[in-house]
Image (tube, rainbow, N blue to C red):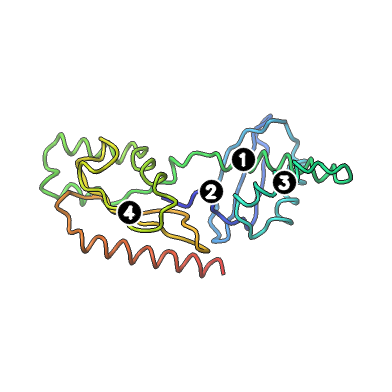
Amino acid sequence: MLPNVENLYLKRLELVRIRAKTVLAVLITMTNAVRNYITRLEKDLKQYELERIVNFLNTNYEDSMISDIAVDLKRIVKEKKEEDKDVMHLAEYALDIIKGIAGSTLENEIYLEGLDQFMQEPEFQDISITRHILSIFSDRSHLLHLLQKELPFQGIKIYIGRENPSDMLRGCSIITSGYSMHGRTIGRFGVMGPTRMDYCNAIRTVRSLSDIISGKLEEMNA
């Protein structure tokens, strides 16, 4: 699971008006990843107004976490200083956009690989079990809910067969771990396999990769 958008650090934001009250937000993170979000606004803004908001956000919040940006924008809006009406209105519009980005679905932020290896395992030679595995890879919501629930936790989590919270996943074992940046868990990843998997090796691998990914993120955002 890629990092939740609220945990990303802003490098640059671009906004493009698509139609009335609908904007394409192009978010460039500190790791130079580019992520696109379609967001609906409460007010129809012209492109020149969007450019003012972009300048406001990029100037004041570069290197800031999206969740921290939202908190500060709420503060500005709440204070409602009469002498800073222009800034307050910019903050209101910017907050609308940031909330739209943060509320975007994570359905497309789950990446799965290794289906062919599943099919090689003797447990999954049964055609009904194969269909079940294919449905897990097709409908990623079960894995998404599992990883989202675990997100605040940094360490290893192990689910063996019926220990899985979702009925859909109870024919497998899952081992997950969090990866972090600046001391905060921002995403999770793991392995899924038959209940007879080599747990010691899988746990070692997941733990090592967690350390490597966390280290690289720290390095890229130093």
Residue on which the image places disc 4: 176
Q: Nearer the viewer, mark 2 or mark 3?
A: 3
- In this figure, which residue is indicated by the disc labeled 3? 75
Secondary structure under the numbered disc 3 in the rendered image: helix
Q: Which one is in front, 69 or 183?
A: 183
Distance between the Cα atoms at labels 2 and 3?
20 Å
Q: Position of residue 192 (x, y in %)?
A: 26, 50
Q: CA distance from mark 1 to mark 2?
A: 11 Å
Q: Residue at the location (69% across, 29% down)? A: 20
The mark closer to the camera, 3 or 1, is: 3
Q: Which mark is residue 99?
A: 1
Instruction: List x then y, in percent, for residue 170.
Output: 22, 40
Q: Amino acid at mark 1?
A: Lys
Residue 173: mark in rendering = none
Query: Residue under circle 2?
Result: 5
Specify whether 82 is left or right of 193.
Answer: right
Q: Amino acid at mark 3?
A: Arg
